[in-house]
Image (cartoon, rainbow, N blue to C red):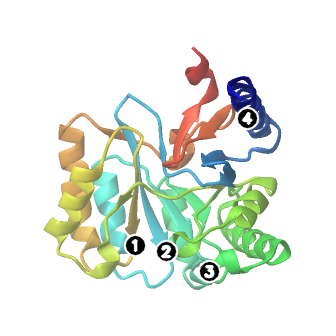
Amino acid sequence: MIRVFKLKNIILAASAALLITVLSLSVYFTGAYAVYYGNTPRLIPIYSVDREDKVVSISFDCAWGVEYTDEILNALKVSNVRATWFMVEFWTEKYGDYVKKIDGAGHEIGTHSSTHSYMSKQNAEEIKLELSTSSEAIESLTGKKVELFRPPYGDYDDELIKTASEQGYYSIQWDVDSLDWKDLSAADIAMRVINGVQSGSIILMHNNGLHTAEAVPIILETLKNRGYSFVPIGELIYRENYVVDGTGRQKSVQKETL
């Protein structure tokens, strides 16, 4: 009985190792993000990046209004920081002049979908349409290819991440939530971000939060004084040979094997 028990354990361990190897290899060939919850593989977006150089990214979701956008852009310019902006298609179409202004200031633009729907409820064809039309709206104004995608509401499932990856997008979440959409004070927003940041963090903010524009200069100045620097998300992430762990932290495969 003891020998049988040991044999079963050996077989189970070997099977698990094989599963991990196969799914890890899928990173190279499909761009899929493999993580493991017990024995169940899942696909997951990038929440943060495993870096030790104190580089972070600040991002703004654009779905409603532009009242505070110029103030945010000015704060970024003063601090010489380039950010990533995720735009919904209907926002892009309504505020094309701001799309051009943001792009012209050297910032990066990703898609935040076409309709800002819960995309985990959509099938693959619906997802493809959301991604393609929203990206086309951005690209027609900037002339630049869209490579990043942020799911509305942070809502996703395997089908969404798989489909986005197959269409050539890196799906991006965040590990630092400013909660600026809740109309917190500028000080509260800033402290949430400042206290939550680590090397490789992706910060979530919104272009039309009531006190976001007031908080941005505090965040940038404080984090720079603490030795952090900022790059757009497209320059923060690994583009190939990576895995994403159960916390959503993207790690270089080459780094892991050293």
Say which label, 4 or 3, has the lower sequence index. 4
Q: Nearer the viewer, mark 3 or mark 2?
A: 3
> Label 3 to label 1, Cα distance in Å?
20 Å
| Element type at mark 3 | loop
Residue under label 1, please give it: 207
Dot 4 alpha-carbon crowd within 10 angstroms: few under 14, some 14 to 19, many 20 or more: few
Label 1 vs 2, first from the N-terminus: 2
Q: Amino acid at mark 1?
A: Asn
- Find the distance from the CA under tag 1 to the CA under tag 2: 6 Å
Q: Residues within 10 Å of mark 1 (few under 14, many from 20)?
A: many
Q: Mark 3 vs mark 1: which is more N-terminal?
A: 3
Circle 2: residue type: Cys
From the image, tell me which residue sits under label 3.
Answer: 118
The structure residue drawn at horizontal position 32% and vertical position 42%, both measured from the top left corner, is 198
Dot 2 falls on a residue whose secondary structure is strand
Q: Is 145 rendered above or below residue 124?
A: above
Q: Which residue in the protein does label 2 denote?
A: 62
Q: State the residue at coordinates (60%, 61%).
A: 110
The type of residue carrying mark 4 is Leu
Report whether 240 appears left or right of 232: right
Label 4 or label 3, whichever lies nearer to me, is: 4
Would you say the residues marked 4 and 3 are in contact, meaning their CB atoms lie under 8 Å apart?
A: no
- Looking at the rendered image, the quarter that the C terminus falls into is top right
The amino acid type, in three-letter code, at marker 3 is: Tyr
Query: Which residue is denoted by mark 4 in the rendering?
Result: 12
Quarter where residue 206 is shown? bottom left
Distance Cα–Cα, label 4 vs label 2: 47 Å
Dot 3: few (<14), some (14–19), or many (≥20) neighbours within 10 Å?
Answer: some
